[in-house]
Image (cartoon, rainbow, N blue to C red):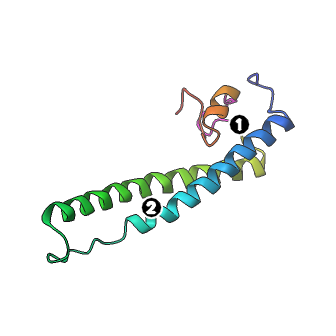
Amino acid sequence: MSPDRPLSAHQLAELRSELEAALAKVIRSMKVSDEAAKPVELDQTAVGRLSRMDSLQSQSMAKSLQERERAKLVLVRAALARMDDGSYGRCTGCGEAIPLGRLMVFPETPTCQHCG
């Protein structure tokens, strides 16, 4: 894609497919991480101290994963919205075209390499 040339219909369709697959994947992943992030039962008679510590650490990692998933979900939905309004492929920072290579690797990116 040249700086002034928009993405072709084929390129947009391919990128939309990637974004929709990413959206489905993050939604599935969020269901799993929501379950893993539930409060840990701290019944001292049920498990040993190391098992409780392991459970708490696993819960903490699941919460971190949830935050990353929420951020990815926002980016993917925003990219799909930009596709719908015709602004996809343009940097939200400087307005220049985002190189196709960058979009192929990070289809949800809202910015070019210089602004991102």
Q: Is residue 66 magenta?
A: no
Q: Residues within 10 Å of mark 2 (few under 14, many from 20)?
A: some
Seen from the viewer's position, the closer of residues 116 and 18 is 18
Q: Main secondary structure of the magenta part?
A: loop
Q: What label sits on residue 33 in the rendered view?
A: 2
Residue 64 in view in this figure: yes
For the point 56% across and 55% down, which residue is it? 26
Residue 71 percent location from the top left of the image: 50, 52
Residue 95 appears in the rendering: no
Residue drawn at (57%, 60%) of the image = 28
| CA distance for labels 2 and 1 | 31 Å
For mark 2, give the secondary structure. helix
Which residue is nearer to you in this view: 5 or 10? 10
Choose the circle earlier in sequence order: 2 or 1. Answer: 2
* Tag shown at residue 19: none
Magenta-highlighted residues: 89-98
- Viewer-proximal residue among 36 and 103: 36
The residue labelled by disc 1 is 89
Residues tagged 2 and 1 counted as in contact (Cβ below 8 A): no
**Element type at marker 1?**
loop
**Where is the N terminus found, in terms of image quarters?**
top right
Circle 1 Cα neighbour tier, 10 Å, few/some/many (<14 / 14–19 / ≥20): many
Q: Position of residue 17 (x, y in %)?
A: 74, 46
42 left or right, relative to 103: left
Which of the two discs, 2 and 1, sits closer to the camera?
2
